Structure formats: C-alpha cells, structure tokens
Image (cartoon, rainbow, N blue to C red):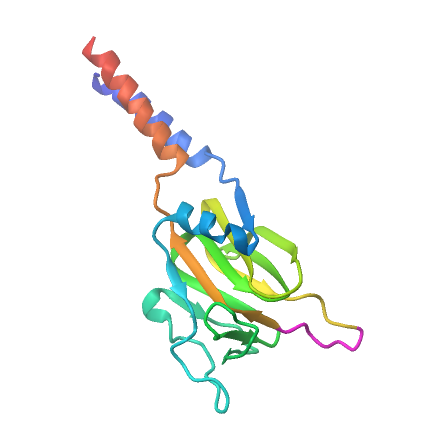
Amino acid sequence: MNMKSYAILMVGVVGIITTYPARAEFSVVSGSANANQWLQSVGTYTALTFTEFPDLPGSTRITEQYAPLGVHFVDTDGNWIARNDLYPQDGSGLAGWVSVDLRFDSPMRAFAAYYPGYSAFSFYSGSQLIFSKTNLYTGGYNIFAGFTSNVSFDRVLLYGEPPNHYGEPDPVYYDNFYFSTVPAPSGALLLIAATFGAARRRAKR
C-alpha cells in the first residue's frame, strides 16, 4: 500500500470511528431459574454479597467500602446493611429508603441483582440515560434480573415504585449484585481490523 492510499484509508477509518452509531442494545435475563445462564454468559464478574459488615443495631451505611472493587454507593438517602428473610442467597443484603445509586470507576457491560418484590433499573453513560427497565416485578423473594449491553455504562440507578398517595417512597432491597467490565472490542474496531486486512491483502497482489 502506498502512502497516498494509506492516507485515504486513515481518513475513512476516522470517519468510521466518529460516525459509528453508539446505539445501546440491552439483553435481559430474568427469573432465578435463569441466573446461571447470565452468570455463565458474562464469564468473569465481581459479586457484592454484603456479608462483610454488621447490621442492626448500629447498622452499617454503605458508601465507599467497596471502592477497592471500583464501585461507589452515592445515594443521598443512604443504603444500609440488613439481615433477614428477604435475602435468601446468604441472609444479608442492602436496604435503601429511596434508591441505590452505583457509580463505577471502569466501564461495565453487564450487571445483575437478586432482590425481593420490585425493582426498576436505569443505566447511564456519564449523564446520559442509555437504558431503563421498569416493570421487573414478580412478587416474592429471590428474584433475579441480569443485563448485558453492547455499549458500556458507568452508573446504575435502582429504585422502587412511585411514592404512594401520602408521598412516602417505596423502599428498595437487594440481596446480591454482580457486575462485569467490557471485555471485547467495539464493532468499529472490528470493522477497522477487517478494512486493514483487506487493504494489506490487496497491496500484496
């Protein structure tokens, strides 16, 4: 390949990078019977079980305890360790008055939770909302919801149903959380690799 052809190709590559659509596509696995399907599909993941800290009396408020794992709990109304029958995975979980707001140091591609009752999930990249799922309610305990995405996210907001007619919020409860980082190159990079490969083959002819 001569320099002129290389320069034209690089202009095309830049165009691919800057115009490649960042459309978020999420797949959802729900139901505890399908949890292993999600866990096996994501491969390596980090699990938060909330078993390391004391509950009432003097319950632990979770903020930066999991920062070494790259996740921060920033909900202003607070999230607290609790232990009771709501958490059949290991007897320990997290309770929130309004929501759980997770911020990640690294971009994620997958997230899952066990929880009782109802939970809504919103995923963000920076300040941009890229996906929401608000009807994951089946009643009972040990409900599982797992998400995988073709684009990365760095924030997950989990929350309950709207406030009741008295204005009281719907508390939220979570047994375990699981999350995984983005492991694969984007479609744009795969396309670039294919383009360079084709160009090199043509240059050798």
Residue lying farthest to the right in this orientation: 165
Give 190 or 96, whichever is nearer the viewer. Answer: 96
Name which residue lies at 46% across and 63% down.
177
Q: Is residue 59 above or below residue 2?
A: below
Name which residue lies at 52% across and 67% down.
101
Give 158 or 83, whichever is nearer the viewer. Answer: 83
Q: Is residue 120 left or right of residue 198?
A: right
How many numbered tags mark residues here? 0
Give 194 or 183, whichever is nearer the viewer. Answer: 183
Q: Quadrant of residue 84?
A: bottom right
Q: Is residue 83 left or right of residue 106?
A: right
Is most of the magenta stretch helix, strand or loop? loop
Residue 101 in magenta stretch: no
User: Residue 100 appears at what percent x and percent y?
Assistant: 54, 69
User: Residue 196 appears at what percent x and percent y?
Assistant: 28, 24
Screen quadrant of the N terminus: top left
Residue 166 in magenta stretch: yes
Q: Quadrant of residue 158?
A: bottom right
Name which residue lies at 52% across and 62% down.
114
User: Residue 202 appears at what percent x and percent y?
Assistant: 25, 12
Q: Which residues are magenta?
A: 165-171
Name which residue lies at 42% across and 69% down.
49
Q: Is residue 188 left or right of residue 171?
A: left
User: Residue 71 appears at what percent x and percent y?
Assistant: 40, 66
Screen quadrant of the C terminus: top left
